[in-house]
């Protein structure tokens, strides 16, 4: 288990694959300008540290970024790439 | 006395509203920004020898051109040039909140920061060196606790001091790194070569920054081909060397500036740990319990609004009844008879009929304010989003739609909780399809008249279900056609749970209530009077009334009136639906208020009092119409023409007669087509 996380940490993957309790770093967001800007204004910029609170398969995704709890639709979590 | 204007900016959930309430007390005025439904709140206060007008800007995270709220906030600062901008910061969430501050700083307006909820931040173990941070950001910083009214005097002092201070060039500002700064400089030089109007108004650097971010609003304002070329080349160049969109790198640099400033001035002794909010969230947003908890809370809201509210509503009804009786009994007989009727039937009947809902409105908005202020509303949206997203609406849309089952008018007002205009408009358009309480009186008359007892329950259920199904289809269709556009993906902050303050809740409730009273006193009053005239004029000539009973005279009067004539005139149009002129006339009357349909039919069938004689009215209906027609009448009443109060409220909330009329005629057309189909197909079978 810990080994597989260790391997995953090095490669870029969608945020939606991260598990509850995991800490990840944002790499980039593959989305349109509007969403990109909205996420940036909420603190989701490259290199930001994200803590996954819950990955409620299926359905929205809760994380903590810059001390604030933010909930994302699943579609959004797939567009955010982290490592 | 000197007058200044101060704009209040800040993130959603930063406690901006509580600071606004603290500063202005009850001296507030709520309106809308022109052309949009975003609420505009203004308030005043007098401090020392200054008269300060506060404008509460919409809560935003940023100042891009991607949402109506951000554009409004930005345009207000740029175009109305307030003397000071107060940015309300949630002190326990500094970095994210300061992001907005960096953008306001770039607009070169005098600023003050209100570090709100500073008590909470301290309890969380944050220590600020405010003097140092204030020097770095070159603005006054005042710790406040809005909901406890702490820091008011200090904040006001800082505001007037900042307003009176000499303007100086900033020393510290966000620097975007060599490559971006080079491009900014090139754009600024290109801007200098254009005519200086736009440049003088917005400032070179701000324009350059927004251009490089490819801000559509600013690009359309500059529209100088040479400048835009420089911008285009710059963007392409930066994209290749930085590997990302310039605006994303720029956002990153702003956060860099903030964390630089915070590093030296803030001590965070404890890391954010699993707190009580997380525990509550684990329950209320869980997949198993989330929905039941939400539905239970909604039931409580519904119960509170319509059940508890029915008592004061009864008192108001009694009051208006007594008022009408008092006028009638004190009116000397035969003396300007029409004026008495206008006052009693038109004004008291119309405006009173709307004002009796005031207790419901107040209770409803109190409940909504409580849900919002505690932070639960964000969770409710989260829970409902899975379902609502499928029909192209936001999770929060569920709340106004649910309220629509009570009354469409407060429901349309409640659609304000939606922050996206397309979502708000779609929700408003379909709200009348949620069958309201007034329509229940129609079903209560018709269902027992035409259907055997064991069919009555399922029939009522079916009617409500048809409304819901139509609402879902209509919302989906509207989102694909009139309100087309990308569904903004679901991104929302879940603010920490907070104890709401009675002051905050009361101010909120009162503002909504006042808006409602004002509406009843203006548009609804006017339309009620107009409809009264249509139902009473022209009067039949005296000889036609000779020798008739009062009952028959009323009947004759209605036939002869404008409404009666229109009812007769539209009969050919209503024939294919199985309706005759009697139903047509009652339908027209029911535009004033849906429950009038029943009393109108009562007049037409010459039934003395609908309450006492209701069974006989049912018998007459049964004698005249088939169950199929009965069903069609209910279907038509469910879907067609919302009542005038709804039209007036839609007009107010959308700020356009166009949308109000679109809703009115669109729903009527839909009702016509549906009823036509049901009647014609039904006739073949039955």
Image (cartoon, coloured by chain):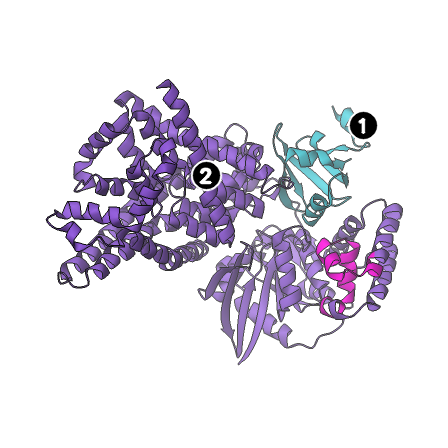
Chain colours: A cyan, B purple
Residue bearing the label numbered 1: A7
In depth, the one of A48 and B355 nearer the eye is B355
Q: Is residue B217 magenta?
A: yes
Q: Is residue B400 magenta?
A: no
Please state the extent of the stretch shown in magenta in the rendering.
B199-228
Residue B249 placement, left or right of B545:
right
Chain of the residue that carries numbered disc 2 in the rendered image = B
Q: Main secondary structure of the magenta part?
A: helix
- Residue count near mark 1 (Cα–Cα under 10 Å), binned few <14, some 14–19, many ≥20: few
- Residue count near mark 2 (Cα–Cα under 10 Å), binned few <14, some 14–19, many ≥20: some
What's the residue at 88%, 55% (across, down)? B179
What's the residue at 78%, 29% (across, down)? A8
Residue B669 numbered mark, or none: 2
The quadrant holding residue B347 is bottom left
Chain of the residue that carries numbered disc 1 in the rendered image = A
Residue found at the very far left of the displayed protein: B547
The quadrant of the picture occupied by the C terminus of chain B is top left
- B106 vs B432: above or below: below
Residue A62 numbered mark, or none: none
Tell me how far mark 1 sits from mark 2, CA to CA: 61 Å
Question: Does residue B686 appear in the picture of this structure?
Answer: yes
Which callout, 1 or 2, points to the residue nearer the camera? 2
Secondary structure under tag 1 reads helix
Question: Does residue B420 appear in the picture of this structure?
Answer: no
What's the residue at 41%, 42% (across, down)? B641
């Amino acid at each position: 288990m810990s080994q597989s996380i260790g391997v995953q940490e090095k490669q870029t993957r969608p945020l939606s694959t991260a598990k509850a309790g995991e800490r990840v770093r944002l790499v980039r967001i593959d989305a349109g300008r509007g969403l990109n800007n909205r996420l940036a204004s909420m603190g989701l910029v490259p290199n930001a540290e994200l803590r996954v609170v819950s990955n409620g398969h299926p359905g929205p995704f809760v994380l903590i970024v810059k001390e604030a709890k933010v909930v994302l639709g699943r579609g959004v979590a797939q567009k955010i790439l982290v490592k | 006395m000197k007058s200044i204007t101060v704009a209040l900016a800040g993130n959603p959930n930063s406690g901006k509203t509580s600071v606004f309430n603290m500063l202005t007390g009850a001296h507030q005025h709520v309106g809308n920004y022109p052309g949009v439904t975003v609420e505009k709140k203004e308030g005043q206060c007098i401090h020392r020898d200054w008269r300060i007008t506060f404008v509460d800007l919409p809560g935003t995270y940023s100042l891009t051109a991607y949402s109506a709220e951000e554009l409004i906030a930005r345009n207000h600062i740029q175009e109305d040039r307030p003397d000071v901008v107060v940015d309300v910061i949630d002190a326990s969430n500094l970095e994210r909140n300061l992001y907005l501050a960096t953008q306001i700083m770039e607009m070169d307006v005098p600023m003050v920061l209100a570090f709100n909820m500073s008590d909470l931040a301290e309890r969380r173990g944050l220590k600020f060196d405010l003097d140092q941070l204030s020097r770095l950001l070159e603005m006054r910083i005042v710790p406040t606790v809005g909901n406890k009214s702490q820091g008011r005097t200090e904040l006001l002092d800082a505001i007037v001091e900042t307003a009176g201070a000499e303007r100086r060039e900033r020393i510290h500002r966000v620097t975007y790194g060599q490559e971006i700064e080079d491009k900014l400089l090139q754009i600024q030089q290109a801007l200098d070569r254009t005519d200086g109007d736009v440049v003088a108004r917005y400032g070179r650097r701000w324009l350059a920054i927004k251009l490089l971010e490819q801000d559509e609003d600013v690009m359309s304002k500059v529209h100088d081909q040479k400048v835009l070329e420089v911008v285009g080349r710059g963007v392409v160049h930066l994209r290749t060397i930085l590997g990302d969109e310039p605006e994303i790198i720029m956002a990153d640099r702003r956060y860099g500036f903030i964390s630089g400033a915070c590093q030296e001035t803030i001590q965070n002794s404890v890391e954010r740990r699993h707190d009580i909010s997380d525990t509550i969230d684990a329950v209320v947003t869980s997949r198993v319990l989330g929905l039941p908890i939400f539905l239970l809370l909604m039931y409580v809201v519904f119960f509170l609004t319509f059940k508890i509210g029915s008592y004061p509503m009864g008192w108001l009804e009694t009051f208006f009844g007594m008022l009408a009786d008092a006028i009638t009994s004190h009116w000397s007989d035969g003396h300007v008879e029409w004026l008495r009727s206008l006052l009693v039937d038109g004004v008291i009947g119309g405006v009173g009929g709307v004002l009796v809902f005031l207790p419901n409105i107040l209770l409803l908005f109190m409940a909504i304010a409580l849900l919002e202020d505690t932070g639960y509303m964000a969770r409710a949206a989260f829970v409902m989003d899975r379902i609502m997203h499928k029909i192209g609406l936001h999770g929060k849309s569920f709340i106004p739609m649910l309220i629509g089952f009570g009354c469409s008018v407060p429901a349309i007002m409640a659609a304000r909780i939606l922050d996206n205009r397309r979502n708000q408009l779609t929700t408003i358009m379909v709200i009348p399809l949620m069958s309201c309480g007034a329509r229940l009186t129609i079903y209560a008359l018709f269902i027992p008249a035409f259907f055997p007892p064991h069919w009555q329950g399922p029939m009522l259920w079916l009617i409500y279900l048809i409304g819901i199904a139509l609402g879902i289809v209509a919302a989906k269709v509207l989102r694909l056609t009139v309100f087309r556009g990308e569904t903004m993906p679901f991104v929302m902050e879940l603010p920490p749970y907070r104890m709401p303050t009675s002051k905050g809740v009361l101010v909120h409730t009162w503002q909504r209530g006042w808006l409602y009273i004002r509406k009843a006193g203006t548009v609804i009053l006017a339309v009620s009077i107009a409809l009264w005239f249509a139902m009473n004029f022209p009067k039949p000539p005296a000889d036609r009334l000779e020798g008739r009973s009062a009952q028959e005279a009323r009947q004759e009067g209605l036939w002869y009136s404008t409404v009666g004539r229109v009812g007769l005139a539209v009969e050919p149009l209503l024939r294919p639906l199985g309706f005759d002129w009697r139903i047509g006339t009652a339908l027209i009357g029911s535009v004033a208020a849906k429950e009038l349909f029943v009393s109108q039919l009562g007049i037409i069938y010459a039934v003395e009092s609908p309450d006492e004689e209701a069974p006989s009215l049912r018998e007459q209906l049964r004698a005249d119409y088939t169950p199929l027609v009965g069903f069609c009448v209910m279907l038509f009443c469910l879907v067609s023409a919302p009542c005038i109060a709804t039209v007036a409220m839609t007009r107010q909330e959308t700020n356009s007669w166009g949308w109000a009329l679109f809703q009115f005629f669109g729903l009527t057309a839909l009702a016509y087509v549906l009823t036509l189909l049901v009647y014609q197909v039904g006739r073949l079978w039955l």
